Image (cartoon, rainbow, N blue to C red):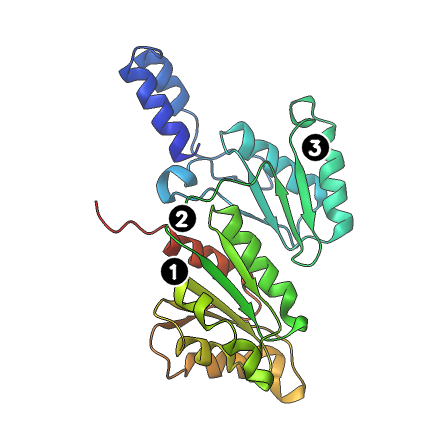
Amino acid sequence: MERSELRTLLEGVAHGRITPDEAVERLGTAPFAELGYAKPDLHRGVRTGASEVVYGAGKTAEQIAGIVVALMQGGQRRVLVTRVDAHKAQSVGESLLQNASFRDVPYAYYEAARILVIGEHPQHDGNGLVVVACAGTSDLYCAEEAALTAEFMGSKVERVYDVGVAGIHRLLAYQELFQRASVVVAVAGMEGALASVIGGLCACPVIACPTSVGYGASFGGVAALLAMLNSCSSGTSVVNIDNGFGAGYSAALIDHARTSR
C-alpha cells in the first residue's frame, strides 16, 4: 500500500463511501507477504513514502515475478527491479504474462542501467530538478541507474554525460544548469575528481557516486571512493562504489523533502 492509496481509503471512510469495518479489513492485511523464499514489504510506502525496490541479482526470474505480483497485489502501483540482465528481464515479463491480472500492466527494460520497471512511470512531483552528471561514457551504466531511479520516484531529471575533468570546459558549459538543480548526482571513476568540481559550482547537495571504472591503481573504484570521501567541497556526500540506485534514491528524497509541516 502506498500513501496515496491510504489517503484515498481514509477519505472514503470520512465521506461514507467505505465503512470502518471495510477499512479495518483492508488495513489488516499483513504488512508483508510470505512467499517462502522472500517476504515482500507491503507497507513500506506508507512508512517511508517510497515502496519496496527489488534487487534482481542472485534471484531467479520466477522469484522476481513472484515478488512483483505480491507487491502489486498488496497495493504497490509500480515496481523497480535493479541489476537484471536482458534475458532475465524477458523471462520476468513472460512469467507476468501468464498471470491474467498482469497482462495489461506495462513493463520496460533499460539495458544500460540493467533496470526493469513494471507499471507506469509517475508524474513529476518533486520540488525542483535532479541533475545526473557522469565523467565518461564508461560510467553510463551507473549514471543511468541513478537517473532512472530518481525518475521512478517522481523526480524530474536532467542528464549531463561525458563531462569529466580531463576536458573541464565541457563541464563548465553547464554551470547554469547546476545552479538550477535541487540536487546533483556526480558519477565518476578513475580519480573521482568530478564530484569536487561540481560541488564548487552549485548551491545544492551533491551526491558523489564512485564507479569501478579505471586502470589498475583505481582498485575497482576504491581510489575514486577515497577521493570523494576526502572532497574539500562542502555539501558533498558519498554512496558506495557503483551504487547508482542509492545515489538516485537519495537524490529523489532530497528533491521531495518537505520544507514545512
- Please tell me which of labels 2 and 1 falls first in the chain: 2
> Secondary structure beneath disc 1?
loop
Picture quadrant where residue 142 is located: bottom right
The residue furthest bottom is: 217
What residue sits right under mark 1 in the picture? 182
Q: Position of residue 106 (x, y in %)?
A: 66, 34
Cβ–Cβ under 8 Å for marks 2 and 3: no
Q: Amino acid at mark 1?
A: Ser
Q: Name the one closer to the observer, 247 or 197.
A: 197
Q: Callout 2: few (<14), some (14-19), or many (20+) C-alpha neighbours within 10 Å?
A: many
Q: Position of residue 31 (x, y in %)?
A: 42, 33
Cβ–Cβ under 8 Å for marks 2 and 1: yes
What residue sits right under mark 2 in the picture? 126
Q: Is residue 42 above or below residue 159?
A: above
Q: Position of residue 138 (x, y in %)?
A: 68, 72
The residue furthest left is: 261
Query: Mark 3 and mark 1: span between their CA atoms?
Result: 37 Å
| Residue visible at 70% across and 46% down in the picture | 60
Q: Is residue 6 above or below residue 12?
A: below
The residue furthest right is: 87
Q: Amino acid at mark 2?
A: Gly
Q: Callout 1: few (<14), some (14-19), or many (20+) C-alpha neighbours within 10 Å?
A: many
What residue sits right under mark 3 in the picture? 96
Disc 3 versus disc 1: nearer the observer: 1
Q: Position of residue 194 (x, y in %)?
A: 51, 79
